[in-house]
């Protein structure tokens, strides 16, 4: 099963609450929320990984 990453955008002006990234085994283990941008507002800084 590919790894998944749950991410929340904490920007107050962004309407996106939370989203999940599913990616292949080829991604480095060090891949985290800071490697992506919000698909709604396009920012990188307000993304935080959801710790379960």
Image (cartoon, rainbow, N blue to C red):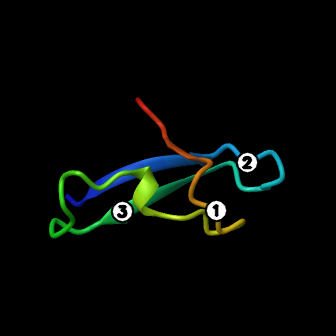
> Which element carries disc 1, helix, strand or loop?
loop
Q: Quadrant of residue 37?
A: bottom right
> Which element carries disc 2, helix, strand or loop?
loop
Alpha carbon separation for disc pair 3 and 2: 22 Å
Which residue is farthest front?
45
Give the residue number, with chain letter if any, for mark 3: 22
The x and y percentages for residue 39 are: 62, 69
8 over 39 or under it: above or below: above
Alpha carbon separation for disc pair 2 and 1: 9 Å
Q: Which mark is residue 4?
A: none
Q: How many numbered discs?
A: 3
The first of marks 2 and 1 along the sequence is: 2
In the image, is 21 to the left or to the right of 9? left
User: Which residue is at a point 73% across and 48% down the rendered structure image?
Assistant: 11
Give the label, 3 or 2, closer to the camera. 2
Number of residues whose C-alpha sits closer than 10 Å to that of mark 2, classed few (under 14), some (14–19) or many (20 or more): some
Q: Which mark is residue 11?
A: 2
The x and y percentages for residue 36 are: 47, 63
User: Which residue is at a point 42% across and 31% down the rendered structure image?
Assistant: 51
Alpha carbon separation for disc pair 3 and 1: 19 Å
In the image, is 44 to the left or to the right of 15? left
Q: Which mark is residue 43?
A: 1
Give the quarter of the figure containing the N terminus: bottom left
1 over 40 or under it: above or below: above
Give the quarter of the figure containing the C terminus: top left
The first of marks 3 and 1 along the sequence is: 3
Q: Badges 2 and 1: C-beta atoms under 8 Å apart?
A: yes
In the image, is 29 to the left or to the right of 8? left
50 over 32 or under it: above or below: above
> Which element carries disc 3, helix, strand or loop?
strand
User: Which residue is at a point 60% across and 63% down the rendered structure image?
Assistant: 38
């Amino acid at each position: 099963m590919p790894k998944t990453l749950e991410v929340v955008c904490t920007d107050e002006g962004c309407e996106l609450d939370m989203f999940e990234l599913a990616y292949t085994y080829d991604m480095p283990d060090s891949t985290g929320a800071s490697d992506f941008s919000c698909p709604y507002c396009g920012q990188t800084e307000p993304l935080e990984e959801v710790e379960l």
